[in-house]
């Protein structure tokens, strides 16, 4: 219904109504990954300055800020470079401090589970380097079409609980971001909260307050010859104050 702009789309949002008519909410954070209909549905219930439109993807994809001006809500992004370019507000990404990993024996050295998104070549290249260094990768590249209802392919989407099972069995997580992306994906957050090593091609990650070369290997900057020692060395605990900064409660409190 959303794809073909059919009428009566708001029936899928109706569960919100009882809560929206109450006075118990001071602010709404609307994620850009949702259909714009949801934002339009909120407008009669909240003044625009109480609605946060949250970009959790680079602004080169999705709705541009200029198209949202008519709604007059506050625009925020997880990417500092996008914030500077489009003159909108910046906040970090976030995670949940109440998520607990299952207890499992380590079976892999480096884990990647995620959508293909044109990254297969680089992911497989990293996998070959890992294997040449005697390391054990577990890579599961989800087909881009896996979200379609009639998908019949070999690599369907994975539930987050299944993903966490694999994280608990791995020493390190592989993070492959889009070119020139400054904003953080969930994988650095998982690295911090679960104390797992991180291998990433996000060179800007060294500018973040949690960066520690003991815990984070940057592709294109660090030496591949050091990779085995990096993966097998112990994780150095992140400062609790820094870790707390990325919890969802602290994240929500930064909106103003």
Image: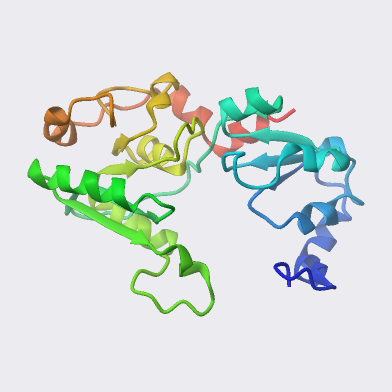
Measuring from the top left, give residue 236's x and y in whole percent.
27, 26
Measuring from the top left, give residue 112's x and y in whole percent.
31, 51
Q: Residue at (81%, 57%) from the top-left corner?
A: 19
Q: Is residue 106 visible?
A: no
Q: Is residue 246 left or right of residue 22?
A: left
Is 176 drawn above or below residue 220 in the view shown?
A: below
Q: Can residue 201 be seen in this view?
A: yes
Q: Nearer the viewer, residue 192 or 135?
A: 135
Q: Residue at (42%, 66%) from the top-left corner?
A: 157
Quarter where residue 174 is shown: top left
Q: Is residue 247 left or right of residue 131?
A: right
Q: Which of 148 and 164 is in front in this view?
A: 148
Q: Residue at (19%, 31%) from the top-left corner?
A: 234
Quarter where residue 71 is shown: top right
Q: Residue at (88%, 45%) from the top-left corner?
A: 46
Q: In this view, does 71 lie to the left or right of 206?
A: right
Q: In which quarter of the image is the N terminus?
A: bottom right
Quarter where residue 193 is shown: top left
Measuring from the top left, give residue 64's x and y in whole percent.
71, 41
């Amino acid at each position: 219904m959303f794809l073909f702009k059919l009428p009566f789309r708001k029936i899928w949002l109706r569960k919100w109504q009882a809560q929206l008519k109450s006075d118990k909410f001071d602010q709404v954070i609307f994620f850009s990954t949702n259909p714009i209909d949801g934002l339009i549905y909120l407008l009669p219930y909240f003044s625009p300055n109480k609605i946060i439109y949250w970009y959790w993807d680079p602004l080169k994809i999705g709705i541009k800020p200029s198209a949202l001006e008519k709604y007059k809500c506050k625009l925020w992004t997880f990417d500092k470079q996008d914030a500077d370019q489009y003159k909108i507000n910046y906040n970090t990404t976030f995670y949940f401090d109440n998520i607990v990993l299952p207890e499992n024996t380590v079976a892999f050295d480096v884990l990647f589970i995620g959508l293909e998104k044109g990254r297969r070549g680089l992911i497989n290249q990293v996998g070959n380097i890992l294997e040449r260094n005697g390391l054990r990768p577990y890579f599961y590249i989800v087909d881009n079409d896996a979200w379609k209802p009639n998908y019949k392919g070999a690599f369907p989407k994975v539930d987050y609980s299944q993903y966490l099972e694999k994280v608990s069995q791995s020493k390190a997580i592989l993070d492959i971001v889009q070119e020139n992306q400054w904003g953080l994906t969930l994988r650095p957050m998982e690295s911090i909260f679960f104390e797992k090593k991180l291998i990433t091609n996000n060179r800007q990650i060294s500018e973040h307050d949690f960066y520690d070369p003991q815990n984070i290997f940057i592709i294109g900057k660090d030496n591949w010859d050091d990779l085995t020692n990096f993966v097998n060395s112990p994780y150095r605990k992140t400062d609790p104050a820094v870790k707390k900064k990325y919890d969802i409660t602290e994240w929500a409190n930064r909106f103003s």
